[in-house]
Amino acid sequence: MPRCKEGLARAAAASSSYVVGVDVGSTTLRCHVYDKKAAIRGSSSKKVETLYPHLGWVELDPEVLWTQFMDVIKEAVQAAGLQMNQIAGLGISTQRGTFITWNKKTGKPFHNFISWQDLRAAALVNSWNRGLILKVIHVISTMLHFLTWSDRYVIASSLTFTTHHVSLRLSWVLQNITEVQQAANENNCCFGTIDTWLLYKLTKGSVYATDYSNASSTGVFDPFQMCWSSVLSKLFSIPMSIYPPVEDTNHSFGSVDAEIFGVPIPIAALVADQQAAMFGECCFHEGDVKLTMGTGIFWDVNTGNHLHTPSSGLYPLIGWKIGKEVVFLAEGNASDAGSTIKWAKELDLFTSVDETARMARSVVDSEGVCFVPSFSGLQVPVNDPCACASFMGLKPSTTRNHLIRAMLESIAFRNKQLYDTIVKEVRVPLTNIRTDGGVSNNSFIMQMTSDLINKKIDKPVNTDMSCLGAAFLAGLALGFWTDKEQLKKLRRTEIVFEPQRDSGEYKLAMDNWTKAVQRSLNWYNQTSY
C-alpha cells in the first residue's frame, strides 16, 4: 500500500471505534468485534466442517470455509449493533499447516484443504525418516556444526519429518494429483495455507501473501535465512515458484474488496493461531510462557531473538515479525485435550462440559484407572505417532466419575511432561505462565497442572486469545492502539491458579499413568494409512 494511502488508513482506523479479530481453528471458526478497551462488543462462531473422504484423510471444503468466514464477520458486526464502515480493520488468525493449491489464472482450487491432521503422507514420512538421504544429512550437518558451531546445523543434524509438516503432504499432492504437477511445471500453481487463501479471496485475487508466523509453521521455511528453504524444496521436488511472498505479521495486506462487505476494510494482520494466542496473552518478553488448551495442548516459550535449538522434540518457530523486531518461540504440543473431552461427551459420559470438574472431584482418585490421550499419537516428549488411546486399570467398581477423573488427569500429566521438557531444553529462565483455550476453563485440570509444575498459572477473562491476538496485531498496525504497553493494560486476569498440593502427592498416580503410556506405544502400523 502506498505511504499516503497507508497514512489515511491509519487516520481512519484511529477515528473508528472497533477492530475485528477472526480465528479459523481446527474445530471452530470465531469472530469477535473489539472496542478500544479490548472488550468484546459482538461475536459469532460456527463449527468448522471437517471431511474424512478416506481412512486417515482429513480435509476442509474451501468454498464452505469461505462462506462461513464471511458469515461470522457479518454476524459478529451485526451482533455488536454496528455498520461495516465503523470497523477500523481486520486481523486473521488461522490453524497452521492446513493448505490448498489453486490455479493461478482462474483462482480455482485443485483440491480441498488438506488438514494438518491428515495422515495420507504417513508412508512417505516414514520412508524419509528411515531413508539414506536423511542419514547423510544428519552426518554432514553434524560435521558442519563441529567445524562452524552454527546452530542451523544442529537443527539439521536432528531433522525428522512428521505428517503435521506441510512439506511431505505437499510433496504427496505433487506426486499424486496430475493437475497440480502440470500447473506447477507451467508456473500456474499457487500454494497457500488458510491465511493466504482467505487473503486471496478477500481481495478477489489481487493480493497473494502469507506472514512469517504461518510460513515458519510449514516445515519448508528457513528461519535462519527468513525465506522459503530451497534445500528442502529441492529434496521434495517442490518448485519454489509456488510459494507466496512472506510479509510482516502486521502489515498493510490491502483491503477487503468493497463488494464483499459493502465497504473496503483494511486487512492489517495475518498470524498463525498459536502465535496469535501468544500475542493476545501479551507474552512479549523473553521467558514468557503461554499454555493453550483447545483441541490440543500447546506450550510456547518466548525465546526473544534467539532461535531455539531442539534436542528433545520442542521445535523453533517465528512468533511474529513487526518491522525490525523478530520474536522466536520454542513450542511443544500434545494433540489431544479438548478432543478427549469431546469424545467423552459423545459417549454420554457427561451432559455438560461444566460438570466434568465436579465429577472428577466427587471421587478421591481414579481408583487406579488410567487414560492415555492419544487419538492422534503422542508428541513431545514421547514422539510416537503410532500410540493408541486407551483406558487401563478398569474394574467392576469403576464409575463414570472415575473415568472422567482419569481423562482429566491425563491432560494434566501431559502438561507436566511438556513443562519438564521445556525446563530441560529451553535455555532462558521461565517467567509468567498464562493460559487460554476452552479447556483452560476446567478448574480441575488447571489446579492439578499448577500443583504438578509447582507454578502459578494466570487465566484471563477472555480465553479466545487467538482472536484477540489477531485484533491486537491489526490494531497496532492501524494506530488503533499505540504500543504493547497499552495492550498489557488491556489484558484482564480472571483467576490465578496457585499450587495447593505438593507434586509428590501425585507421584503414584503419574507413575501408573506413565506405565499405561508405555503399554500404548507402537500400537498401530505406520503404513496403515
Image: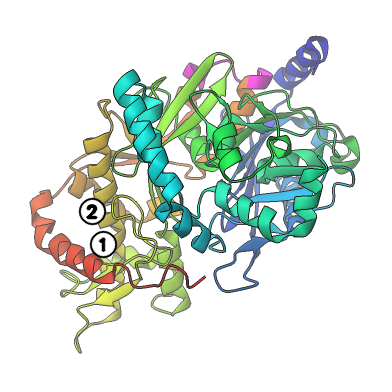
- Residue at (42% x, 50% y) in the render: 132
Q: Residue at x 80, y 30 (%)?
A: 255
Circle 1 residues within 10 Å: few <14, some 14–19, many ≥20? many
In three-dimensional space, the C-alpha distance between marks 2 and 1, rounded to whole angstroms, equals 8 Å
Front-lying residue, 439 or 289: 289
Q: Can the viewer see residue 300 in this picture? A: no
Q: Amino acid at mark 2?
A: Met
Q: Is residue 525 visible?
A: yes
Quick check: 317 left or right of 455? right
Q: Position of residue 183 (x, y in %)?
A: 81, 48
- Within the magenta stretch, is there residue 94? no
Which stretch appears magenta? 477-486
Q: Looking at the image, is 183 positioned above or below residue 396?
A: above
Name the residue located 44 percent from the left edge and 41 percent from the top edge: 461
- The percent coordinates of residue 440 (x first, y second) are 39, 51
The residue where tag 2 is placed is 448
> What residue sits right under mark 1 in the picture?
409
163 or 261: nearer the viewer:
163
Say if 321 sits above or below 443 in the image: above
Secondary structure of the residue carrying tag 2 is helix
Residue 271 numbered mark, or none: none
